[in-house]
Amino acid sequence: MAEPNRPYREVRALERGLALLDAMADMGWSSPTALANRAGIDRSSAYRLLATLAAAGFAVRRDDGRYYLAPKVQRIGLEIRQDDLELQTAQSELDVLVVRIGWPSDYAVIKDGRLTIAASTHPRTTMTVFRRLIGQHRPLLRSALGRAMLAAMDDGQLAQTLELVRAAAGEDASEIEVDGAVTRAIEQARRDGFGASHGLIESGTSAIALPLRRDAHVIGAVNIVFFSTVLTPATAAARFLQPLRDCVERIERQIGSLH
């Protein structure tokens, strides 16, 4: 029977076939016996599964009877976009962070000139008034996420980002044109060592944030969101800036290993 938290029973043949694909990736050209041993399945099953994988275009059989991954597998891998892998990495580490500190977090990127939530742990905790944030936008200059990103950019990336924001029009485009607004937000974040927002978006909600980099290029930011009546950005930073920094560093290391 299926386990309570697993509504569907696993397909054993599929599991064994995937185990053989994994074994071929590890071992290179190998005999069915060697692959069966590595995958932990019996040899007769391995022969049948390898023949099926070859017929479906996922494996190639040499004249000597050895098997290896077919180019089709590589094409599938290449179709997984870099930003998809980065997003998966960020979400995984945010899941770890919310267990560690209790408060929710978001990972945001600038997409089409707007600061967009790409991953979130608000649904994973009761310490929030938000639930569905993924895909929603946040004000660039009034959010901790936006301030953290802008403060970490060099002059070239900053200028390019602001041009994208202007091209997208909307509220952000108007706010960045206010005299000195961008400079003040950046200078404050650099003095603090993190982006902060104290009730600037929702009156009862505040946040701190750190930028996320890939090869010294700012690609996003991660925040911690909390109730303004419970914490200020300064007290939140004293308690949670190090866990947030640890989270960002783990994401950056994993993203770096994807290249």
Image: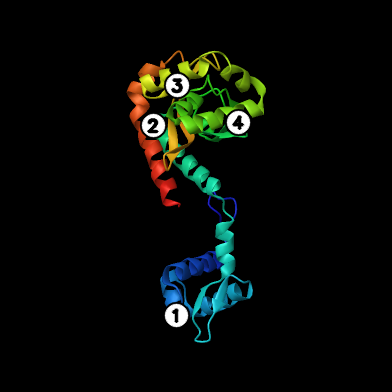
- Nearer the viewer's eye, disc 3 or disc 2? 3
Q: Position of residue 22 (x, y in %)?
A: 47, 66
Amino acid type of disc 1? Thr
Residue extending furthest toward the bottom: 64
Q: Nearer the viewer, residue 250 or 105?
A: 250
User: Quick one: quadrant of the N terminus?
Assistant: bottom right
Pointer 3 or 1: first along the chain? 1
Q: Is residue 48 above or below residue 243?
A: below
Q: Position of residue 166 (x, y in %)?
A: 62, 26
Residue on which the image places disc 2: 244
Left or right side of 175 for 31: left
Residue on which the image places disc 1: 33
Residue on which the image places disc 4: 164
The quadrant holding residue 103 is top left
Amino acid type of disc 4? Leu
Q: Is residue 185 above or below residue 224?
A: above
Numbered disc 2: secondary structure:
helix
Pointer 4 or 1: first along the chain? 1
Numbered disc 4: secondary structure:
helix
Whether tag 3 and tag 1 are in contact, CB under 8 A, the answer is: no
The circle drawn on residue 13 is none
Pointer 3 or 2: first along the chain? 3
Pointer 1 or 2: first along the chain? 1
Amino acid type of disc 2? Leu
Amino acid type of disc 3? Ile
Q: Nearer the viewer, residue 83 or 23?
A: 83
Residue for point 54% across, 45% down: 83
The quadrant holding residue 98 is top left
